[in-house]
Image: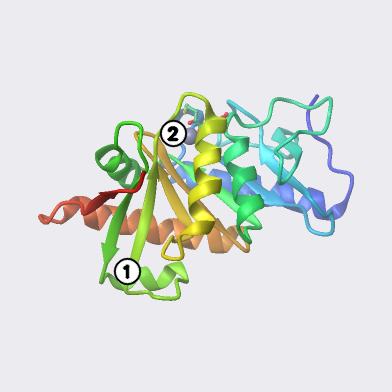
Amino acid sequence: MSYTPTTVAARQTAQQLAQFSRTLYERGWMPGTAGNLSMRVPRAPGRALITASGRDKGDLRIQDMVEIDAETGRPSPGQDRASAETSLHAALYRTTDAQAVIHVHSPHATAVAHRAGLDGATSVVHIERYELLKGLGLDDPAAAKLPVFPNWARVDRIAEDIAAHVPADPGCPPGLLIADHGITVWGQTLGQARNRLECLEALCQLLVLSPAGLNVTRVS
Ligand SMILES: CSCCC(=O)C(=O)COP(=O)(O)O
Ligand SMILES: [Zn+2]
């Protein structure tokens, strides 16, 4: 059954998600139904909305959202199928201060995720010196260690890797890559998450353009 908001805050959240999704789709970052967005619902502790699975992300409506428990990803009963990647969002709500999470398949981040992914192990891409690092809100804006997680077929396993790594690494930016797949970014608002996404996508573009190549180290 399609989603019907029961509060003004929930309606506004659903509208925001649909609008952001359209913008990201139009940039070419959510091609062919790829990508998913979620946001905690203001004044509804523990609740979040996430995009339904398999929808055209350039043409979402309020009804295309699914209400979930933010930290477990469990959907409220009787709704459409939540994003297949809901557990990634839940892992970030559980382990960070995220209020909003964006997952897209933007081209440069995905290219870096393809090159830097290791077979069955987590790695980090070292990003240094670029001014754009200041857009990530890190304690040390001179360097970031962008993690790259294996793209396990079982999405819950990727979520377990994320929950184990992200809170444990102080150099970890508010974003991560999944090998051969895409990028996930979070923030205190959807706007902040989008700005961080723009910085990381631009940084990945610079890494792809740089003749120095990628500086990748293995974590596990
Ligand atoms: C067509 S891309 C394959 C699935 C994916 O990676 C994605 O981001 C979209 O999945 P969802 O279930 O959220 O539509
Ligand atoms: Zn994806």
Q: Quadrant of the N terminus?
A: top right
Can you say whether 157 is above or below 48 in the image? above
> Is 64 situated left or right of 173 in this image?
right
Amino acid type, callout 1: Ala
Is disc 1 surrounded by few (<14), some (14 to 19) or many (20+) residues within 10 Å?
A: some
Q: Residue at x 32, y 74 (%)?
A: 142
Residue 91 to residue 83: above or below: below
Q: Secondary structure at mark 2?
A: helix
The residue closer to the viewer here, 162 or 3, is 162
Q: How many marks?
A: 2
- Residue 193 appears at what percent x and percent y? 54, 58
Q: Looking at the picture, how far across and down is residue 33, in whole percent?
A: 51, 29
Q: CA distance from mark 1 to mark 2?
A: 30 Å
- In the image, taking residue 15 as reference, residue 194 lies left or right, namely left
Residue 159 in the image, given as x and y percentages of width and height:
55, 39
Q: Which residue appears at 71% of the width and 40% of the height?
A: 72
Q: Are marks 1 and 2 in contact (CB under 8 Å)?
A: no
| In-image side of 117 versus 4 (left or right) | left
Q: Position of residue 126 (x, y in %)?
A: 28, 59
Residue under the image location 55 percent in, 39 percent down:
160
Q: On the image, numbered disc 2 is attached to which residue?
A: 31
- Say if disc 2 is inside 8 Å of ligand 1: yes
Q: Residues within 10 Å of mark 2 (few under 14, many from 20)?
A: some
Q: Quadrant of residue 100?
A: bottom right
Numbered disc 1: secondary structure: strand
- First reached walking from the N terminus: tag 1 or tag 2: 2
Amino acid at the residue labelled 2:
Pro
Extreme-right residue of the structure: 6
Above or below: residue 220 compared with residue 191: above
Label 1: which residue? Answer: 143
Quarter that holds the C terminus = top left
